[in-house]
Image (cartoon, rainbow, N blue to C red):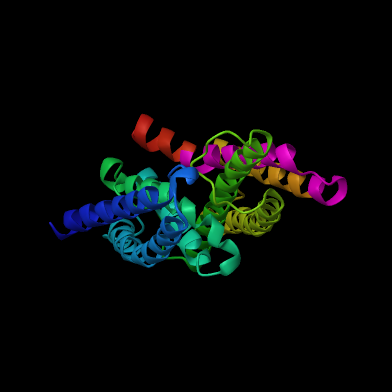
Amino acid sequence: MIDILTYLAAFLLYSLVGWLIWRSLYRQPSTQTNGEEKSAAATVRYVHYVMFVPLMLHAFVLYRTILAGTGLNLGVGGAVSLIVWLTAAIYWFSGFFNRYQGLQTLLAPIAAAAAIAVVLPLVFPSLKPLENTELPAFKAHLIVAMSAYSLLTIAALHAVLMTVVEYQLHHPAAHSLLTNLPPLLAMEKLLFAIIWVGFILLTLTLLSGIVFSKEVFDQPLTFTHKTLFGFISWGTFAALLIGRQFYGWRGRIAIRWTLAGFAMLLLAYIGSKFVLEVVLSR
């Protein structure tokens, strides 16, 4: 009963945060006075602190879901919920830095995504606990992997936002709900900073996966669809960073490569877990 109430409270609070920000900021700018704009900004700052409560409730739900019983119960629902929580937590923490204040208007869609993600472990429960989770190598691999997926999720979201900003530059008369975003060049610089960190963590994820496989199963890494798409994703982000460094890739090229790499990452982990657990019921 307590767990159900925690799920419900986290879902409702996430929804409330998203609704408050949407109501305060996502209006036609021409209809807002200076006083209303200041009031909206103050609401966002206040809601930014309120967001801490559903984040902690979500963390408690994940703890109870993933660590319940023996081993780790990390099914597809728990995995998606954990990645979304890490993404929301990293994004929430970045809001305390002045240079990223313009991105706080995105708390509404992030809170909406988190509201859905927090109940996913109920919809797609773990079928069985993972094996060998008591090993330090596995725990390190899991922490690095989840951090990499979360950062690259933020990079993909950032790439989509850059598409919106670029569209606004070419269509200044077009109405957009996202009117307070930073300049395109600033967002592009931040995008590559996120990708660099995510790429390093993804590299460590693949390397630790190889080491973990040898340590636990006493055999090299098994070549599966998950492994294939993982290395394709790594190669895509590597090519993007090389293209940026030596050929000055930017704009639409950078956005396309970022989204392609993220799509491969989704197929590598979430896609494989969804097929095995939901489609094949393994």
Quadrant of the image containing the N terminus: bottom left
Q: Residue furthest left?
A: 1
Residue positioned most to the top: 279
Residue at (50% x, 56% y) in the render: 146
Can residue 126 be seen by looking at this rendering? no
Residue 37 is a magenta residue: no
Identity of the residue drawn at 44% across and 49% down: 32
Residue 152 percent coordinates (x, y)? 58, 50
In this orientation, which residue lies closer to the viewer: 220 or 115?
Answer: 115
Q: Is residue 253 above or below residue 181?
A: above
Number of callouts: 0
> Looking at this view, is 210 or 234 the one in front?
234
What secondary structure is the magenta-colored segment mainly?
Answer: helix
Give left or right: position of 263 versus 135. right
> Which quarter of the rendering shows the C terminus?
top left
Q: Which residues are magenta?
A: 242-270
User: Depth check: 138 or 63 in front?
Assistant: 63
In the rendered image, residue 235, in percent from the top left (x then y), is placed at 71, 43
* Residue 190 in which image quadrant: bottom right
Q: Is residue 242 visible?
A: yes
Is residue 245 within the magenta segment?
yes
Q: Residue at x 60, y 49 (%)?
A: 155
Give coordinates of residue 95: x percent, y percent.
50, 64
